[in-house]
Amino acid sequence: MQKIPLTVRGAELLKAELQHLKSVARPAVIEAIAEARSHGDLSENAEYEAAKERQGFIEGRIAEVEGKLSMAHIINPAEIHAEGKVVFGATVTLEDLETEERVRYQIVGEDEADIKENKISVGSPIARALIGKEEGDVAEVQAPSGVREYDIVSVEYI
């Protein structure tokens, strides 16, 4: 069984989602099914079908989140002692060698990734190119437009 890496924040988000699904979404869909059943003939009841479909989605997501949490390997970036190397949970400041534009990313688990928050998945091409490198190294990333080179300006564990 393969462990799923999660930051502490990522695990908290999954636990909160699971709590919401079990305490809010599941009861709401059960109520919607009961309401739709009260309308009579179920064979042509679009509300009933939609509610049943939603119930299937919710139950599937509950099982998925519970599975991920049971296989989680929770990593606190602040407790990492990687001696300046880029590892899971690290926050990395990069400079594009071509445009001199700087970006800052945290390498997180798949479920936590959100480019709007500058959180990239450990499985993304840029994260894979960065893992194991350290401050001052140059990482080559295969992008759709071709190979991009990034100078690793800093590596933080926050």
Image (tube, grey):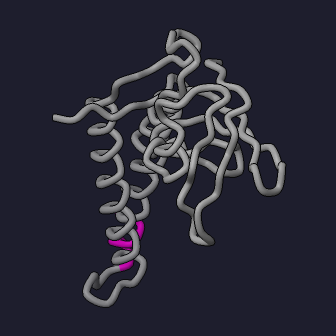
Foreground residue among 143 and 118: 143
Q: Residue furthest bottom?
A: 44
**Magenta region includes residue 84:** no
Provide residue 28's location: percent of width, then percent of height: 46, 53
Provide residue 113's location: percent of width, then percent of height: 55, 46
Q: Is residue 39 left or right of residue 9?
A: left
Q: Residue at x 67, y 34 (%)?
A: 152
Foreground residue among 143 and 43: 143
Is the magenta region chiefly helix, strand or loop?
A: helix
Q: Residue at x 32, y 80 (%)?
A: 40
Q: Residue at x 71, y 26 (%)?
A: 154
Q: Residue furthest right?
A: 100
Q: Is residue 121 left or right of residue 51?
A: right
Foreground residue among 93 and 67: 93
**In this view, 43 is above or below 54:** below
Q: Residue at x 51, y 22 (%)?
A: 8
Q: Answer with the quarter of the image where residue 105 lies.
A: top right
Image quadrant in which the N terminus is located: top left
Q: Answer with the quarter of the image where residue 84 lies.
A: top right
Image quadrant in which the C terminus is located: top right
Provide residue 102's location: percent of width, then percent of height: 80, 44
**In this view, 120 is above or below 43:** above
**In this view, 41 is above or below 104:** below
Provide residue 126's location: percent of width, then percent of height: 55, 49
**In this view, 47 is above or below 58:** below
The number of callouts visible is 0
Query: Which span is picked out in magenta?
Result: 34-39
Foreground residue among 80 and 59: 80
